[in-house]
Amino acid sequence: MAIKSKNLKISIGEVEEEREYKEPEGPTPNPDIADLREWDLKLLNRYKPKYYGFIQQCQFCALGHCDLSDNKKGACGTTLEKHLAREGLQLSITGASAHSAHGRHLVEVLIEKYGRNFPLDIAENTELKAPNIQLVCGYKPETVGDLERGLNYIEEQITKLASCLNVGTESSDFDYNSKALHVGMLDHVAMEICDIAQITALNFPKGDPNPKLVEFGFGCVNKEKPVILCIGHNVLAGASVIDYAEANNKDVEICGICCTALDLGRYRTGAKIVGPLSYQLPYIRAGIAEVVISDEQCIRVDLLENLKKLKTPLIATIDKYVSGLEDLDDENPDVIIEKLLSGEIPGCYLHDTEKLGEIAVKVAVNIKERKNNMPENGKTQNLNLYEGAIKKTSQCIKCGLCKKACPVNVDNQLIIQSINHIFNNKTVVCETSEKVIENKETVRVERERKGMKDGIKFLTKDEILESLGKCLFCGRCESWCPRQIPIVSVFTEVYKDRLANDKAKISPGRGAIQDVEIRNVGQPVVFGEIPGILAAVGCSLWPNSGKEVGEILEEFIKRNFIVVVSGCTAMAAASDYSGTCNLFEKYGGNFGAGNIVNVGSCVSNSHITGAAIKIANIFAKRNLRANFEEIADYILNRVGAVGLVWGTMSQKAVSIGNGVMRLGIPVILGPQGVKYRKELLGDIECPYEKDSEIFDYGRKNLGLLDRWKIYNTINGEIFDSEPAPLHLSYAANTKEEVMILISKLTLRPGDNTKGRSIKLSHYIDIYRKYSGKGRYVFPDDLDKFIRVEGDIPMTMSDEIKEILKANNWKPRKIGDPTIVKRMINQGF
Ligand code: SF4
Ligand code: SF4
């Protein structure tokens, strides 16, 4: 029950003040799960789902499993398309829940520590503090306590959306897709809550374009000191350890893996960023840490299993990742320290951050002393798990199972045999007799299937090192190996010199984009004179991803794009382990042409969508408050932004991507992207139109246009547009394909002729450079993107005019574009 007066709402257990917000409220404050369905209809009418069912069965209910291949239906009546659309929704809910729960934890802890009225302080020179919250929820948060309101809304929506996964609670793949986009939008609100709470309370850089660079890489960790390694995404545990060490003058090395690492770097520039999540296993096995602290998200399931072998204690600090450990929160710190040091327990669950600092530091210092005092010839404790692993490669029987296991097709069998050949100085013996291998039949069948022969060509040492760049160190191959060869440990041992020298500098993350920066770039971005905004985010989990991401980003930085990164992709931009990227040391951090901006950890992705929203509000003066459809329509038609997720793993990438797409920004996924079940493509026909009434209804009653038709807001005239942006999500296979797509997906109907001409120059140039078709070719679809002669790049004018003539090209009208009928005659 709530009692409302003019400016004050009082409800049982809380006092919630209505903040002043002069901007008129738009049509969709706190939109419910179907309130933005008409916007999704416009998007999904243009961008059709192409589904990927690697497993064409459903085992979701007790009547399953149901074979859904060849148009067969399940016991509930579902089809494969609907099932895959539901799985897409499920992935998105999982990802958004991770950020929402993360936000709830952060806000609760910070309210307890600083009070509900602690004022939000997010970025210098900035009035528009929370663009996602203001756009979606329609209120302006001023204090940490105000963030609870957004969380309440998100949690209610996520519960409702999760209920749609239950059997018999949705029946249309269009609506599953619409709901998945809704979850994505919620995710950006959740991420914004997380990041503005921690920026405020932990005094992270506040939109500083050039925050102090932090040391990055395995080699930057000072192993002379006791090392405490934090893994995950929630910085509070690691920050409390830093606080304790500073207050008690303890000289310990605090470092991190994954987004916790970036946030520790934002908290104190002395914290070291070891690397991305993909390198978790080799880092752990290298015995880098005396104590490991886990928090939440993207932490390996077998972390404790590996740490036990090293006798390195694990302290789990968040109830979402407890790892089967004993809860010692109520225990005396001295008792906990003793239990951990004696090895009585392999670790503990401890969510009291007051105790955590003391326990982690004292245990780390003690273990370090113990290691230092260990006589060389009497070591009782393993210092790492890789030493001697190379010797075990002589056990290899060339069965090829490791190669079959690899999710990214690394020829690990060849690498293992080459390592054995070079490092053990002997060739492998092919043993397939029953005495050495239990699954002999499996091996025989597999070898026959692959047509494998015993004779192989070995790699040189340099080729081995080069090949290891393709390995994600996921460890899947190890459990397939019938000879229990610890393949990741072998690779780590071979790689150890390279790891030891792996050092670079990285921007830990500046947080939000300042309003003043948006004022500077709004016009050139919207008119197309800054050719695009490239936002590269995600896990960067793909063979050679560091190198390839670095090359992609540098290509576009040099072309005056604004390049934005976050999370593990920011780490890939800092170093590709060959020292050739180091983009943060080469380029500036302004949100401006030719710069690279690291916004921070995963949750800082909200500042990327926030920047696009700010362009619509600050530059174009579009109302922001609860006005999602209008702002998204503006971004879709005018802001040449593209998302890139080159190598991805987690479900969070799905929800983040859906949020980006609902805002009208296309996303390019790496080859693994199809594992997320679908692409949304602008050049295929839609299977769901066959059985969905909604598109007919939309065309008759809602002003829904044909695919590439567009309204002119000035007079309501319907005109032909170019296919821009061509796709809403697309899984690319190669770096070269990505390069070409980025330049094409930045084209927008709202480009002015000068901007369009600049963008087309880049498109043509990149096409010539990366298509493999030669230096003088033009893209096949070039004529589609030329509206008037003024769009033609000057330096290629004669040749392009010839092409246009050959294609019977006719000039088209350029209007003020929208796909939302109610935007006509609004006086923009
Ligand atoms: S560790 Fe993973 S990526 Fe590397 S070879 Fe093994 S299965 Fe492939
Ligand atoms: S699975 Fe093991 S034994 Fe088989 S080829 Fe790979 S490393 Fe050799």
Image (cartoon, helix red, strand yellow):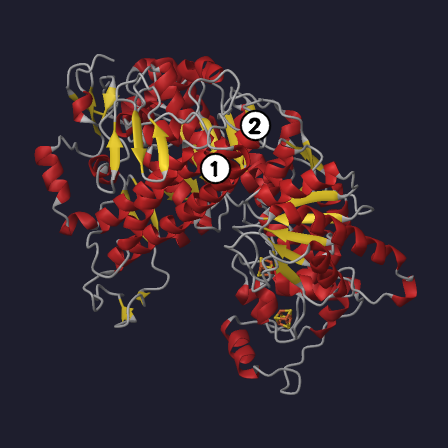
Q: Nearer the viewer, residue 6 or 748?
A: 6
Locate ligand 1 by image quadrant.
bottom right
Residue 153 location, quadrant: top left
Please provide percent x and percent y for residue 185: 35, 38
Residue of label 1: 194
Disc 2 residue: CB within 8 Å of ligand 1: no
Q: Most extreme residue toward the left, as rendered?
A: 700
Residue 660 visible in the shown view: no
Residue of label 2: 510
Q: Nearer the viewer, residue 75 or 102?
A: 102
For residue 486, the mark is none
53 relative to 560 in the view: left or right:
left
Type of residue at label 1? Cys
Type of residue at label 2? Arg
675 relative to 702 in the view: left or right:
right
Q: Tell me if mark 1 has few (under 14), some (14-19) or many (20+) residues whose alpha carbon lies within 10 angstroms of its own.
A: many
Q: Nearer the viewer, residue 204 or 672?
A: 204
SS of the residue at dot 1? Answer: helix
Which numbered disc flags the more N-terminal residue, 1 or 2?
1
